[in-house]
Amino acid sequence: MQICRSTQDMRAWREGAARVALVPTMGALHKGHLALVSRARAWLDLQGGGQVVTSIFVNPTQFGPNEDLDKYPRDEAGDLALLEQAGCDAVFLPTVDGIYRPGAQTHVEVAALGRMLMGRLRPGHFRGVATVVTKLFNIVQPQAAAFGEKDYQQLTLIRQMVADLDIPVQILPVATVREADGLAMSSRNQRLTPPDRAAATVLNLALDQAVQMVAQGASLSTLRRQIRKTLQAQPRAQVRSIDTRDADDLSRVQTLVRPVVILLAVRFGDVLLIDQRVAHP
Ligand code: PAF
């Protein structure tokens, strides 16, 4: 597995690879990330072969001033061992200065999708995501890139950005991987205290109930009331947002007639967890 620590090294390696699928990550890898690597590999196999590149970069521009950038888990040696086992071909491990040159003035902003929902809770977050993903696409020049459905708004926004800017990268969505008790895998789970870790299963419980309610024809107001009730029954859960949006473009819905995505953001201690599920009426 080739390790590239600079843009120059990455570009030199890329010149020798005919077809590449990229897995952008911020490290602290778990089975959810490995599912992205498998999806990238499966896509390449269907195209007749190619190389999987994983990027590991804790992107400072997507963290707000009071967020957990300093506490974000980092484990380079563990990540490299997992990627090697998973059959990844190359890893891009740039430094902050390597990605953000002093004096840079350009950023990428996906207007409405970047400001709604999690963008309201975390101003500037999606501008940081869109900018770094564009830079990674320009450096690695992949034909495809895998993103998890767990970060549903991020996935929707990247699809929009790629379409708006005619970026020739196919976006491969990957279903959320869950722990045995249903908690969506996330690098942030490591920061939960044991009681918060146990309490966090309430997210999956609320989503399971919601999916059933939508299938049984519940109204939007009943659905929202029940989700809030289930989450609030867990005293450790601090509900930040509950949203029900159109599953394609995240526009607001008044009735449950088309597939919707239910998006939850809940804090446990100082850890903000998100989870989502698409529900079909
Ligand atoms: O989903 C993530 O891990 C990050 O937001 C991403 C896409 C790697 C950009 O920093």
Image (cartoon, rainbow, N blue to C red):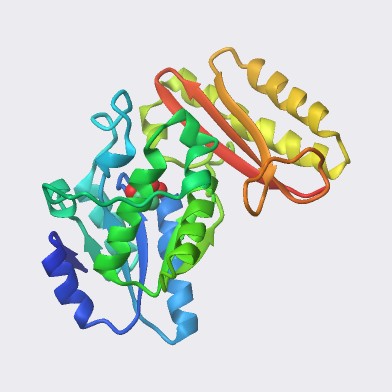
| Res. 19 image quadrant | bottom left
Q: Is residue 88 left or right of residue 159?
A: left
| Residue 47 sits above or below residue 175 on the image | below
Considering depth in this image, is 235 or 145 the residue closer to the camera? Answer: 145
| Res. 28 image quadrant | top left
Q: Position of residue 251 (x, y in %)?
A: 66, 45
Q: Is residue 30 visible?
A: no
| Res. 221 image quadrant | top right
Q: Is residue 101 left or right of residue 145?
A: left
Tell how many labels. Answer: 0
Residue drawn 60% across the image and 41% down it: 276
| Residue 88 sits above or below residue 34 on the image | below
Q: Is residue 221 left or right of residue 175?
A: right
Residue drawn 29% across the image and 34% down it: 72
Residue drawn 72% across the image and 19% down it: 229
Q: Residue furthest top?
A: 235
Q: Position of residue 105 (x, y in %)?
A: 21, 49
| Residue 134 sits above or below residue 178 on the image | below
Residue drawn 39% across the image and 20% down it: 270
Q: Is residue 272 left or right of residue 60?
A: right
Q: Position of residue 179 (x, y in %)?
A: 52, 41
Q: Quadrant of the N terminus?
A: bottom left
